Every structure is written in C-alpha cells, then in structure tokens.
Amino acid sequence: MSFFAPLPQQPADALLALIGLYRDDPRAHKLDLGVGVYRDEAGRTPVMAALKQAEKRLWESQDSKSYLGPEGNAAFTRHMRALAFGAGDFGGRITGVQTPGGTGALRLAAELLAAAKPGARVFVGTPTWPNHPPLLAAARLTTQTYTHFDVATQRLCFDEMMAALGTAQAGDVALLHGCCHNPTGADLDGDQWAALADLLADRGIVPLLDLAYQGLGHGMDADAAGVRLVLDKVPEALIAYSCDKNFGVYRERVGALFALTAKAADADRVNSNLLSLARANWSMPPDHGAAAIALLMEDPDLVVQWRTELDGMRDRLRAVRDTLAAHGGALAHVAEQNGMFSQLPLSPPVIARLRAEHGIYMAGSGRINIAGLTVETAGRFAQAIAACV
Ligand code: LMR
C-alpha cells in the first residue's frame, strides 16, 4: 500500500481557483472581482514606478546573494517598523524579523504564540480572511469565533465583538485586522478602537494585529491609527505586516513580524524565538523584494513617488466605491467601507448567475475586489446585480 494512500484529495483553494476560471473565460466583457490584487483603470497590476527604480538600483549595486540570516534584511525591517508603529520608540520593547509575506508573518506569529502557550485560544471575528483559520489551526491554536460583521445588513457588529472579547481571559489572543478589513472593508472608528484597546488591556488579551493594506483605506498614518491606539495601551502585542498591496510586490513575498514585549529586557529573548522558528520553517526569507523596498525607503524622492502612487491607488478605490454606492441596493454601503474589499449581501445562486450570465467573477462569499472595477464598469456591475437578484 502506498505511503501516501491515506491522504485525501484536498479541494483547490476556492479564491485562488478563480484566477484560472477567469483566465479561461473567453468573454471580452468579463470582470475579475476575485483575488485581492490592485488593478489600475486598464485592469493591469503594474510594478509601482518607485519600486521599479529601486529594483534597478538594486540590480546595479548588489554584489552578492550570500545568505543574510533568518532575520532577513534589517534595514527593511526597521523601515516597516516605522510605518507600522510610527515615530514612538516604545523604550526598546519592539523586536521584528522579515518574513515571506504577510502570511509568513501570521504563521510565525501563530507558532510563537503556540510556543509560549500551546493551544492558546485566539478570538477571531467572522467573516475573516479564509486563510486565517487554517493558518492558526496549523500551529495547533484553538479558535473562538464571534460575529464581526453582519453581511445581510452590512453592519459592523462592534457590540458583539466587545461582548465576545469581554469573556476572554488573560493570555487569550485577539486576531484583529489593522485596517481595510478583508473581506468586508468594515473597520472600527477611532472611538471603537479606543474602547477595544481599553478592553484588551483590562483583560490581558494579546492582540495579533494583521496589517496587510496600510495606505489603501485613508492614508498611511490614518490606517495605522487604530493599531497604534492598541499598542499604546497593551503591554504585549504582535503585528503581522504585509507589503503585497501597498508596495505591489505580491509574488516577491515581502512582510515582517513585530513583537511588542512587556519589558525591553524581554525583546532579545522573544527575538531569539522568532529566529529559531523562522530557521525551522524557511531558514531565511526571500530577499529581492525586501532589499528593493529598503533601497526605496532610504531615498526621500522615491518615498515621495511611492506615496504619490499609493495615494492614487487609494483615490481610485474611493471613486469606484462612491460610484457603486450611488446605485443603492446591495451596493448602498460600499462607500462606508475601506480598502480593496466589500462583502455584498448576495446569495450563492445570484453569485453563480453573475458568473454564468454576465462573466462577473467574485468569491463565493460575495466578496468583491473593488480594484477589479472602474468608474465606467461600476454601472454595468450594478445593472448585472439588479438583473440577477
Ligand atoms: C486575498 O484575500 O484575495 C489576498 O489576500 C490573496 C490571498 O492570498 O488570499
């Protein structure tokens, strides 16, 4: 009998499968609202011009591809730390490592949590990014869900969130989306973040903050404001940072994991655990994207160029949201939501009809990637929904 015989056939990842289904659809007017990549007006996902410049300089200046070590590119990590944490120095209580994308950061966070407290309980608001639960389960953490967002009414369930976290005990973990909630776009406002920060601190809950879309909601600092309110209140926290979207480096796999420790004296020990877990997982993170971003961040002109490009991406998403919301119905709340995604109150048969009859590809949950639309195609999308509901 084959050693591999006990392995069941695993289903393809439903979200990633949309890439192939869309590609194979011959219809010219098809719309790809599936996987979360930014697209410009022409439907392209270009390499950002500032990054391209940095890559050129990297190619010209890099004289070795020798190993750097499990910590990755230290200059990159220092710059990402400033983007996430802001100017505050937190008295030497922050440590961080470069990771293979935001997913690598989350996986490393999950393993660190499991190493500190095997089977630790993680509170997760639903719906959430479909890869969150399996990633936590892979580290043998336990998950406790609560409702973050009611899709039918498009309402953020803040009271439900506070009630659920009010039952947590010291040493439980809360997985929180830092901004541009994936899949709903429904973020907490400043007062809600402040109340949440107090609750986390009061109950001794460790926040695991997933910051994957900084700059695509309201701006770089505005999108980190809630995270920073939490960091100011709690003694310990983890931040999983992704550069996929805000630097457009998806396939390069660029991210970082940061730990805020209770005392500065803890930071080295926590860091040594991050390094040994990283070593056992991937040994060292891929270098190219992080090295290019580090070069970009060290040139003020390139930073201005990158920020301008990012502002343009955010403005485009906002314009599409405003256009969609003006159509009302299932789209009425889209302008109140942030970032690349909204989860529409559409039934599975409607989602299937949109695909079959109109060539519109979206996740089976009703999540749409706003960047898959333009101000021009938004009307066609709205009409297709009206024809199918
Ligand atoms: C998404 O949610 O579409 C992206 O984060 C891509 C992914 O890996 O799922």
Image: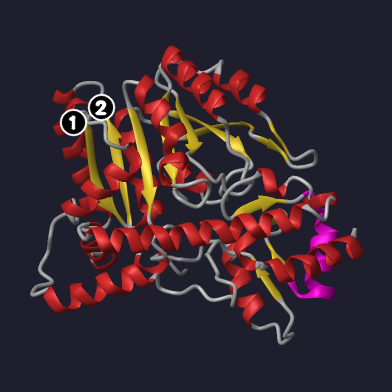
Q: Which residue is mark 2?
A: 261
Q: Which residue is mark 1?
A: 267
State which region is magenta. Answer: 345-360
Q: Residue at x 32, y 37 (%)?
A: 85
Q: Main secondary structure of the magenta part?
A: helix
Residue 244 seen in the current view: no
Q: Residue at x 58, y 64 (%)?
A: 35
- The location of residue 281, given as percent across then percent down, is 28, 53
Q: Residue at x 30, y 58 (%)?
A: 303
In the image: residue 192, left or right of residue 320: left
Cβ of mark 2 under 8 A from ligand 1 = no
Badge 2 vs badge 1, beta-carbon distance below 8 Å: yes
Q: Is residue 180 magenta?
A: no
Label 1: how many Cα within 10 Å (few below 14, some 14–19, many 20+): some
Name the amino acid type tagged 2.
Thr
Residue 292 seen in the current view: yes
Q: Is residue 348 magenta?
A: yes
